[in-house]
Image (cartoon, helix red, strand yellow):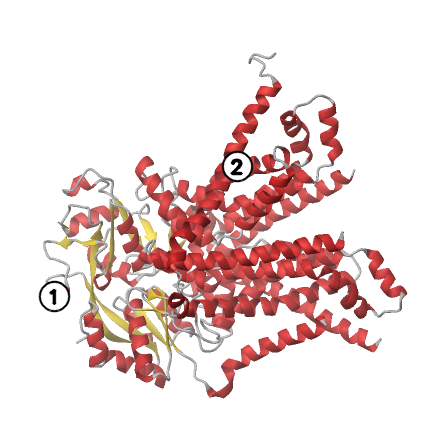
């Protein structure tokens, strides 16, 4: 038996929509303000000198050049290693094997590992690459660990992209007498490339933002690296360190600004690539 | 066709490398961690909150109980979900049901873009704005507490949950919507009685994946949660999560301590595997029911 | 085309890998450990590089225990340790004193409390004292911050101040001197302990048992919260490591440390 007075549906809708829009506005405002606040506080201090000098002194004042170089190397090498392996695996899974228990298991494994926290990869990299393989704190150790971390994502997104290519394309290619590999390179990959590229680019963004992994594998040395066996501090880790140890200083905001802009740029690139993929295949 | 054979071999090798690399991590993790749990005893490891791993004159026998951290992770994740799910559901419903298509086309990618903000930036904003606010208005010491961590993690998980939920809601066949409206339902009634119900499995999958993101977060938590080794009694108490425990101590760890941290990693791994499996099963069910 | 791209990528990786192997280039000397020593070691490393340019020295943090572990498992050649070694440790690693330092109890600059006794500090960190008015301060909740388990600073603090009492589980934990200092700076009721050499104008050091926390107090022995800064090695050092250690112990190195707030090794 209804005890409460019945709220007319139109009124109920008005209330609900107002409430939901308020919450949505809060979310958009929060997320937007975070970015705008950091850019507002940080960009004035991102000078040419800041980008081309390194930190020094007891208070680690100064620029972020070693961090930029270090981040580029660690994330770059990591993705450079993971991309061919990941795309190759995706091609293998879709074009060169039959759908079955094994491929389902591999897919499940990749999905699971894509969700594993980065600290576990970091812990593994520290113990395996750092200690067991004697790489110590090095760019290489960080890059290989990051490669493992983004590999499942690259495999899955590449696979989705390749599968989205219509079957008819493959049939036509075979009909014209191509070999499997020719079909893969000239037809499937050409169509799936934006989708694959999106996955790779997003992984690059993730690699750049990653802090826990590099802290444990590449260390946190502030000097300019001279080889892949040198320790280095990445941009995200540097921001974490100076924000935590010296507070919200201009230097911290500037580092964050550079970090956020790099990641945003990468994500926007990925977004436009995805748009191209969707329009091409559909 | 010789070329094809070579290519096939090459690709098989590549695929095997990938699988080997990923299997290596899992095997390594379990090989280091599981024997430790066996040696220490599951009860002492999982159910004791006494975590004193470093041997010193005050502590001759090391203790490895991670209960405080398990509770910490669970509490902080639960809090994050309360914050995150409320906000994401609001966004997802608004974007798909109550928003002009052109505005939604701008807002959805904007929210996804924001998923790329590094976690350390969220943690930093939490330390600089949220913690002092909590400290001034609610007490709780300097503001590093469960509440602060929950809010920060909730905001972090938000883009993930929102974008997957939006996809789920957009995948509901238009006929469901039209049918409900044709019967005289308001949009809100349609949303609650039809759309959300139809997209239910996708939304559940989104929430579970968001949960995975929250429980796996490390750096932001170290910045905002206080890292004390105790079971929190209130929202304003400091807390340490499983992830923070690993990150804070892996460098310090003597071999036995390191094994204990790997065992912590195994715990985390299993929790997330369970969550992800549930998400996969649930979303596969959605694919089946949407097709029918 | 894709094959060509992949081949290029693999070649790039190999090139990157080989860049470290080729030309007989030496690897940098890795120094890891105490966050108390880390800023000073970083400064010495960059001065050392400026001076001779050939050998690079790279410094990580992690805590004193992390330094010992790093030396033990080969991640670093030199470990930094900000406490005395235990007898077992002394058997395994050769400690070299590079400086002496004090531990300062710090509070927010707005806190009117000037000093505390050791018993009061003990009570605060053991969780007995929850409000500043119990120790002569304002009516403000006490937030205590300590270091993580493997910290040499924490070990020394526990040994010299806490004695047989343990630090309360509810005390917040931060992983380095810098983060403790920043936590104290950012919240008015906080108290923590950091290396004396890292105290700056953002925080206020307290007098302990009436003695001011200064380098002079440590030198004269009046300020008893003091500990050595050690470089530890496993076995004999590599020539590069030895050269760096010699630099740190030289007058030039020691002068740099004293200028920045530490006390000479001798």
Chain letter, disc 2 residue? A
Q: Tell me if I can see residue B218 in this picture.
A: no
Q: Tell me if I can see residue A218 in this picture.
A: yes
How far is mark 2 from mark 1, CA to CA?
59 Å
Q: Residue C11 has which mark?
A: none
Choose mark 2 or mark 1, whichever is in front. 2
Chain letter, disc 1 residue? C
> In front here: A197 or C28?
A197
Residue at the disc numbered 2: A24
Circles 2 and 1, Cβ within 8 Å, touching? The answer is no
Q: Position of residue B243 (x, y in %)?
A: 46, 53
How many neighbours does mark 1 have within 10 angstroms: few (below 14), some (14-19), or many (20 or more)? Answer: few
Residue C155's quadrant in the figure? bottom left
Residue pictured at 22% horizontal, 64% vertical: C197
Along the horizontal axis of the image, is B210 left or right of C197? right
Q: Residue furthest bottom?
A: C23
Relative to B111, does residue A60 appear above or below in the rendering? below
Along the horizontal axis of the image, is C242 left or right of B110? left
Residue pictured at 47% horizontal, 56% vertical: A260
Residue B190's quadrant in the figure? top right
Mark 1 secondary-structure assignment = helix
Q: Position of residue A242 (x, y in %)?
A: 35, 59
Q: Position of residue C95 (x, y in %)?
A: 28, 75
Q: Residue C216 has which mark?
A: 1
How many neighbours does mark 2 have within 10 angstroms: few (below 14), some (14-19), or many (20 or more)? Answer: many
Residue pictured at 47% horizontal, 48% vertical: B46
> In front here: C215 or A30?
A30
Q: Give the position of the N terminus of chain C as an image quadrant.
A: bottom right
Mark 2 secondary-structure assignment = helix
């Amino acid at each position: 038996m209804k005890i409460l007075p019945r709220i007319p549906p139109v009124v109920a809708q008005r209330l609900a929509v107002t409430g939901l829009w308020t919450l949505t506005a809060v979310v958009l405002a929060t997320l937007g303000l975070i970015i705008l606040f950091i850019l507002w506080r940080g960009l004035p201090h991102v000078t040419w000198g800041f980008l081309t000098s390194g930190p020094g002194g007891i208070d680690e004042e100064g620029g972020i050049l070693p961090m930029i170089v270090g981040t580029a190397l660690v994330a770059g090498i990591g993705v450079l290693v993971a991309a061919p392996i990941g795309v190759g695996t995706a091609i293998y899974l879709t074009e060169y094997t039959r759908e079955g228990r094994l491929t389902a298991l591999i897919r499940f494994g990749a999905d699971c590992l894509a969700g594993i926290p980065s600290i576990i990869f970091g812990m593994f990299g520290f113990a395996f690459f750092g200690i067991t393989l004697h790489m110590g704190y090095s760019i290489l150790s960080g890059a290989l660990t990051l490669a493992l971390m983004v590999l499942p994502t690259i495999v899955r997104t590449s696979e989705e992209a390749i599968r989205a290519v219509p079957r008819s394309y493959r049939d036509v290619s075979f009909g014209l007498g191509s070999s499997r590999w020719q079909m893969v390179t000239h037809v499937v990959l050409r169509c799936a490339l934006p989708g694959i590229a999106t996955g790779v680019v997003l992984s690059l963004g993730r690699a750049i933002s990653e802090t826990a992994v590099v802290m444990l594998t590449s260390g946190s040395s502030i000097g300019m690296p001279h080889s892949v066996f040198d320790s280095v501090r990445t941009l995200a880790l540097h921001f974490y360190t100076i924000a935590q140890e010296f507070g919200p200083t201009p230097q911290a905001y500037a580092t964050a600004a550079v970090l956020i802009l790099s990641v945003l740029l990468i994500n926007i690139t990925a977004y436009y690539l995805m748009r191209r993929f969707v329009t091409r295949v559909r | 066709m010789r070329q094809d054979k070579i290519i096939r071999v090459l690709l098989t090798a590549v695929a095997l490398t990938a699988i080997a690399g990923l299997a290596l991590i899992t095997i390594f993790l379990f090989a280091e961690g599981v024997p430790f749990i066996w040696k220490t005893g599951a009860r002492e490891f999982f159910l004791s909150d006494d975590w004193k791993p470093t041997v010193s004159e005050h502590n001759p026998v090391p203790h490895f109980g991670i209960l405080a951290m398990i509770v910490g992770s669970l509490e902080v994740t639960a809090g994050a979900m309360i914050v995150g799910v409320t906000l994401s559901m609001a966004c997802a419903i608004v974007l798909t049901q109550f928003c002009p298509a052109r505005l939604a086309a701008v807002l959805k990618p904007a929210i996804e873009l924001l998923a790329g903000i590094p976690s350390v930036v969220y943690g930093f904003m939490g330390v600089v704005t949220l913690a002092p606010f909590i400290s001034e208005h609610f007490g709780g010491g300097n503001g590093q507490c469960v509440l602060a961590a929950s809010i920060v993690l909730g905001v972090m998980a938000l883009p993930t949950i929102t974008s997957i939920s939006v996809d789920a809601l957009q995948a509901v066949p238009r006929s469901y919507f039209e049918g409900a409206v044709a019967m005289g339902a308001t949009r809100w009634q349609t949303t609650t009685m039809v759309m959300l119900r139809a997209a239910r499995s996708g939304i559940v999958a989104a929430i579970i994946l968001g949960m995975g993101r929250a429980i796996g977060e490390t750096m932001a938590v170290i910045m905002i949660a206080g890292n004390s080794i105790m079971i929190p009694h209130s929202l304003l108490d400091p807390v340490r999560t499983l992830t923070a425990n690993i990150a804070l101590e892996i460098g310090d760890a003597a071999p036995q301590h390191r094994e204990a941290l790997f065992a912590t990693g195994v715990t985390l791994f299993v929790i997330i595997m369970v969550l992800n499996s549930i998400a996969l099963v649930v979303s596969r069910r959605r694919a089946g029911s949407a097709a029918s | 085309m894709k094959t060509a791209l992949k081949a290029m990528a693999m070649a790039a990786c190999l090139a990157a890998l080989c860049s470290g192997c080729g030309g007989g280039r030496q690897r940098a000397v890795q120094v890891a450990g105490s966050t108390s020593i880390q800023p000073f070691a970083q400064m010495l490393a960059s001065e050392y590089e400026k001076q001779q340019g050939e050998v690079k020295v790279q410094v990580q943090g992690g805590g004193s225990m992390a330094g010992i572990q790093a030396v033990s498992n080969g991640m670093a050649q030199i470990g930094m340790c900000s406490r005395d070694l235990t007898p077992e440790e002394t058997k395994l690693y050769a400690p070299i004193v590079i400086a002496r330092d004090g531990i300062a109890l710090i509070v927010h600059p707005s806190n009117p409390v000037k000093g505390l006794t050791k018993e009061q500090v003990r009570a605060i960190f053991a969780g007995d004292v929850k409000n500043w008015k119990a120790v002569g301060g304002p009516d403000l909740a006490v937030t205590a911050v300590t270091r993580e388990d493997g910290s040499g600073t924490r070990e020394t603090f526990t040994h010299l101040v806490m004695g047989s009492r343990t630090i309360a589980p509810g005390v917040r934990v931060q992983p380095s001197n810098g983060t403790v200092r920043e936590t104290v700076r950012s919240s008015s009721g906080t108290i923590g302990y950091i290396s004396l050499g890292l105290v700056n104008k953002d925080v206020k050091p307290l007098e302990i048992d009436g003695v001011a926390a200064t380098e002079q107090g440590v030198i004269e022995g009046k300020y008893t919260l003091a500990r050595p800064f050690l470089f530890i090695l496993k076995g004999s050092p590599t020539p590069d490591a030895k050269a760096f250690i010699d630099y740190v112990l030289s007058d030039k190195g020691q002068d740099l440390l004293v200028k920045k707030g530490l006390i000479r090794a001798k």
